[in-house]
Image (cartoon, rainbow, N blue to C red):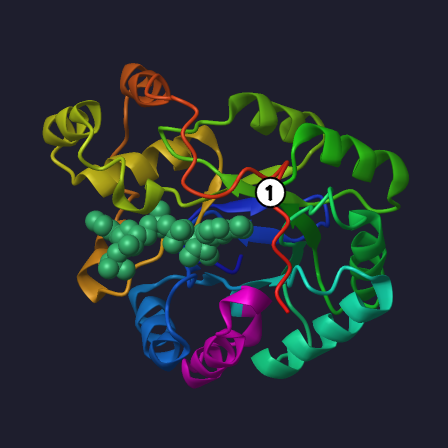
Amino acid sequence: MRAPSQVPAIQLNSGTEIPQLGFGVFLIPPEETEAAVRQALEIGYRHIDTAQMYGNERQVGEAVRASGLRRDEVFVTSKLSNRWHATDEAVLAFDRSLEELGLDHVDLFLIHWPLATVRDFMDAWRALERVHREGRARAIGVSNFQPAHLERLLAEGEVAPAVNQIEVHPYLVQDPLRAVGAAHGIVTEAWSPIGRGKVLADPVVTEVAQKVGRTPAQVVLRWHLQRGDVIFPKSSHAERMRENFALFDFELDERDVARLTGLDRGERIGPDPDHFAMVPS
Ligand SMILES: NC(=O)c1ccc[n+]([C@@H]2O[C@H](COP(=O)([O-])OP(=O)(O)OC[C@H]3O[C@@H](n4cnc5c(N)ncnc54)[C@H](OP(=O)(O)O)[C@@H]3O)[C@@H](O)[C@H]2O)c1
């Protein structure tokens, strides 16, 4: 098992395992990323979530190498830029990711956005299937895919996605989409797990936190873990990284899990994947 003992590992349909708790690096400036990831690895995180569009893959790779950990002890995910959905371009972009990271493989590579109104994600998926066959992406998956996108991918693809990384937090619980994934053996990864801080002042969250003697962030992150999703909260502060990692010595009861789920109001922080069409130049 790759993860330190207290972090559960979840089996992917690729046959590999993913630590259920990781560290996300979206919005960490490149010049701060190496230090942040080194700190996270020191605390015990063994799963890093980056992307071509975050502009910090190089610094993630530097931190992994500087940590002294074996390559197979750290799970590394990256994602295809919206710019490179054409099959040949996507393969070249994947090659550049490995070069930036300084690695000979990634543990997981994702299509970042479906872009279904402007591109054909099946073109990009063929590229991911190719690098997966070559062993350079141990698992492949998607992000921000809606049920119709998943159905098409499953019908037309040769390899089923291992994960769907989607926005999930108590104000957007996404149970129907999570259920579609589960029915097809696709693990849900919940991005913005604490809603970038927006859900932490909710009276239900603070009440449960007070009851269990934990912080609001710990309660919300624990809620995700008990629902079975994979999470990778981001923080640029060491004390918060530690707080977000200390989730394995308490539990929420079923009623509190249900109360947090009941906060759902369909409220997104990020764009609506059915309409998002941003392609960087
Ligand atoms: N696939 C996609 O389209 C997509 C989209 C968005 C995100 N993601 C992934 O998901 C990861 C996490 O999502 P996210 O970064 O958007 O949001 P998040 O993890 O829900 O929240 C991060 C924000 O919350 C603050 N924070 C962290 N821990 C805290 C704590 N214990 N108490 C109070 N505030 C805390 C952080 O501030 P400080 O840094 O100042 O501590 C930061 O502003 C990303 O890093 C990325 O890897 C993927």
- Nearest the eye: 58 or 221: 58
Residue 128 falls left or right of residue 56: right
Q: Describe residue 154's horizontal placement relative to residue 37 as left or right.
A: right
Q: Position of residue 210 (x, y in %)?
A: 10, 30
Element class at badge 1: loop
Query: Residue at image x 29%, y 17%?
Result: 259
Which residue corresponds to the image point at 16% horizontal and 41% vertical from the top-left? Answer: 215
User: Per the image, is 53 magenta?
Assistant: yes
Residue 106 in view (yes/no) = yes
| Left or right for 184, reference 169 | right
Instruction: Provide the residue designation for mark 1.
Output: 144
Q: Choose between 33 and 137: the one closer to the eye.
A: 33
State which region is magenta: 51-72
Q: Quadrant of the C terminus?
A: bottom right
Q: Position of residue 226 (x, y in %)?
A: 40, 31
Predominant secondary structure, magenta span? helix
Name the residue rendered at 35%, 16% in the picture. Answer: 262
Is 233 above or below relative to 25? above
Residue 270 is a magenta residue: no
Residue located at (69% from left, 34% from top): 185
Q: Is mark 1 within 8 Å of ligand 1?
A: yes
